[in-house]
Image (tube, rainbow, N blue to C red):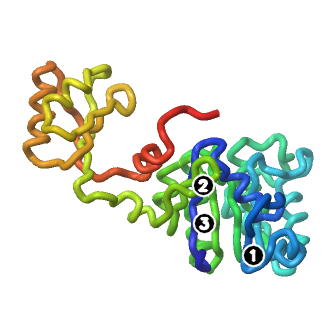
Amino acid sequence: MPRGQLLALLGPNGAGKTTTIELCEGFLRPDAGTVRVLGLDPIASGATLRPLIGVMPQGGGAYPGIGCAEMLRLVASCGANPLDVDWLLDVLGLNACGRTPFKRLSGGQQQRLSLACAIVNRPALVFLDEPTSGMDPQARRLVWELLAALRADGVSILLTTHLMEEAETLADHVVIIDHGEIVASGSPTALTNGDPENTQVRFRTRAGLDTELLAAALPEGYAVRETSPGSYRVDGSVDPQVISAVTAWCAQQGVLAEQLQVGKRDLEDVFLELTGRELRT
C-alpha cells in the first residue's frame, strides 16, 4: 500500500474486515502467516508502531462520561506533535458540543469525535472501521473532504465501509473479501470495467413486472432483474435495438419506462456478483 493512498476493504457481514484491521493494529495475534504494517510486526514491534498509526474502531471507544473536547485533548496529550485541538473540533463540526459528554453525543457526533482522536497525533497510517456509519449526508461529505486532505498530506488510510459510493469516491484501491479470503482487488475503475460488453439498461416503472417475460422479449443472453420495487436492470450488450425492445415491451404491459439510463456496472454490482445476494447477520 503506497504512502498517501486510501485502500477500501469491503466484504459482507462476517467476512473478516474488522478481524483483518485488528490484526494490523496488533489487537489480535495471527493464527498463521505474517502481518507487516509500515514494515513492522504489530505484535513484536507494537511499542514502535503505535505512535505511527491512528485507530478508529467500531463503536467509538471514548470514555462515556468525558466531554468531547476533553477527550480529544487527552488523546492529543499522548502525541509529540498533535494537531491543534480547537481547529480539529471546528473542522469536524464539534466545537458547539465541546463540553457535552460522549454518551450524550449523537451517533454521528460520536463517530466524528472518534475520527478526530484517530488523526489528532498526525499518524502515518490510519485505520478507520466504518468511519461514516450513522452520519447524515452533510457530515459524511465533510469527512470525505477531510480524508482527501489527509491523503494529500501523505497519510495512508485503510478503511472498511458498507457504502459502495464511499469506496468508489475515495479509494485508490479496493479489496473485496469473503469468508476471510480476497475475492477481488484493484482500483474501482478496474473492478467495474470488466467485460466491455457488460453494460446495463436501468429504468423505473410499476413494481412487480414479470422479468422473465421481458428477458424472453430480448435476444438470448440478457438477464433482467428487479433490483428494488419498481427499479429494473437489464444486463448485456446494449444497443439501440435492445433499448427499443425494452420500451416496446413496457408499452405492451401498459407501463412507461421512466428514468431510463444506459451505463456500466458499478461497484455494488461487482460486490454482489462476488459475494452473493443472501442477507448475512
Label 2 crowd bin: few (<14), some (14–19), many (20+), radius 10 Å? few
Q: Is residue 95 visible?
A: no
Is 122 placed left or right of 134 in the picture? right
Q: Quadrant of residue 93?
A: bottom right
Q: Secondary structure at mark 2?
A: strand
The residue that label 2 is drawn on is 181
Label 3 crowd bin: few (<14), some (14–19), many (20+), radius 10 Å? some
Of the numbered discs 3 and 2, the one sitting upstream in the chain is 3
Is 106 placed left or right of 218 in the picture? right
Q: Secondary structure at mark 3?
A: helix
Residue 69 percent coordinates (x, y): 84, 58
The residue that label 1 is drawn on is 122
Distance of label 2 from label 1 (alpha carbons): 31 Å
Could you tell me the amino acid type at mark 1? Answer: Arg
Position of the N terminus, as image quadrant, is bottom right
Which of the two marks, 2 or 1, is nearer to us in this view?
A: 2
Residue found at the very far front of the displayed protein: 32
Of the numbered discs 2 and 1, the one sitting upstream in the chain is 1
Label 1 crowd bin: few (<14), some (14–19), many (20+), radius 10 Å? many
Q: Secondary structure at mark 1?
A: loop
Q: Is residue 101 visible?
A: yes
Could you tell me the amino acid type at mark 3? Answer: Leu
Whether pointer 2 and pointer 1 mark residues with C-beta atoms closer than 8 Å, the reply is no
Could you tell me the amino acid type at mark 2? Answer: Glu
The residue that label 3 is drawn on is 147
